[in-house]
Image (cartoon, rainbow, N blue to C red):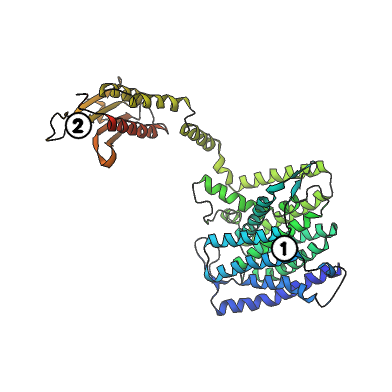
Amino acid sequence: MTTLSTIFILALIISLAVTPLMKRVAQKYNLVDLPDERKVHSTAIPRMGGIAVFIAFFAPFVSFLFFSTTITELLIINKQVIALVVGASLVFGVGLWDDIHKLNPFIKFSIQLISTLIAYWGGMRIYGFVLPWGGGISLGWFSLPMTVFWFLVVINGINLIDGLDGLDAGVTLFVSLMLLVLCVTDENFLTAMGFAALSGATLGFLRYNFNPASIFMGDSGSYFLGYMLAAMAIMGSVKSQAAVAILIPIIALGVPLLDVLWSPVRRFLLGRRLFSPDKEHLHHRLLSLGLSQRLAVWILYGITILMGILSILMVNVSNEQSSMILLLIGAAVILGMRKLGYFEYFDIDKVYGWLKDVTDQVGITHERRSFLSIQVDIAHSTDLTEVWQRICEALERLGFDMAELSLNFREEGVPGSVGPASWEWNHAAFDRNKDVIKECLLKLELPLLGKNNEKFGTLWLIKDLERDAISQYTLRRVESLRRTIIRFMEKFDPAKNA
């Protein structure tokens, strides 16, 4: 324990000393984070704090090369340690370069992927899951994609929550302390040293990053913290005898994991780009409720601490009790998301409407299939009279009150060409002489344009919305009908049917 305490204190002191230095360097070279519509700070803030965290983490281990204890003897240069250092340095480097010069997202993602593969090569792999209610799941060949997914989710989850002063460093601090306790309990002292250094480095940085922040860690810091948490969480769970194994760090990292997993889902539901930035993250939602930055951060700290305590409890209770804790966590997550307004996407009427749209689009509903049958009949019609009869049948199904189809086949100077032709139809309850000037009429003029803008004619439609409201599928059906008529006209030879 003395060694772990020493590592923590050394990392803390170095972080406290180096962070102000990096602040001055960032200010001197104008390496600052400028405010914009997505960010909550209103002034330019230095963003080189990630360098201080990086140095503060590794410096204690360099000093222990000259002093030896029972625990530090575990620090041998092996494949896993090499992979950890190289991978962490790689994501830190790409983050630092992005802080200074701005990188293409594809390049950043590619470097993250490479660093993850390095970790996998070094033996930091998710082989399977031990379930809290007994039994387990062996991943087999799926171990690689699952490990990659885990690293990318944690790295980008920590990066996403770096939106409020002190949030990123504070969440990492509390998660590291919780996992440190679990590693010490399990006598996994090698990983415990890593969490001790990470805790000290983030605590020292938090002194300057808590609201109101005087320095940010930037992508270099958030990528580094995310990578180290992902890697050491796997290292800490490999020897764990707890019934939940890798589920422990998943629960402890609840805040960033929930944010990074939910973000692309809600963007997909709203028809936005899956990885486009926005102001709909958890901390933004808390601010939208009228909370101050500091209070929002404290709430997320509290959630992180609570999740960490629950993960520790799961180590010391039975499988059945672990299952109950997971159910409670799940219920709390659902209630919290509902309170933050995320479930407005899942209102019953919206879900029902979406399902109706899907079933209609794929042709499952009876209404869609019956209308499709009319379209097929139009396509297989032998003359214009039959086509018009089918069109009238379709329009009556759609609730239209009046229609007029005007076709023009006349081509000046072409012998034997057929002249204009037109048809009219109206619903029995619609008086075309009186009702055509009523209010609340939907009037559509649909040009029948074929390939190369060939003009076949025009279809005019009128619908009395007071008599029958328009459905959400009416205009879609009308457009399908228009295209079907055009396809028929492209095949129709007026000279043969004159």
Among the 4 quarters of the image, the one containing residue 432:
top left
Distance (Cα) linking label 1 and label 2: 78 Å
Camera-near label (1 vs 2) is 2
Q: Please, what secondary structure does the residue beneath circle 2 have? A: loop
Furthest residue in direction top, as rendered: 428
Q: Can residue 211 be seen in this view?
A: no
**Residue 409, label in figure:** 2
Residue at (58% x, 60% y) in the render:
110
Q: Which of the two residues, 442 or 94, is positioned nearer the viewer here? A: 94
Q: Can you identify the residue that label 1 sits on?
A: 173
Q: Please, what secondary structure does the residue beneath circle 1 have? A: helix
Q: Where, quadrant-wise, is the C terminus in this rendering?
A: top left
Residue 15 is situated, as x and y percent measured from the top left of the image, at 70, 73
Q: Which of the two residues, 67 or 52, is positioned nearer the viewer here? A: 67
Q: Taking 346 as reference, is 21 above or below it?
A: below
Earlier in the chain: of badge 1 and badge 2, it is: 1
Q: Can residue 148 be seen in this view?
A: yes
Amino acid type, callout 1: Leu
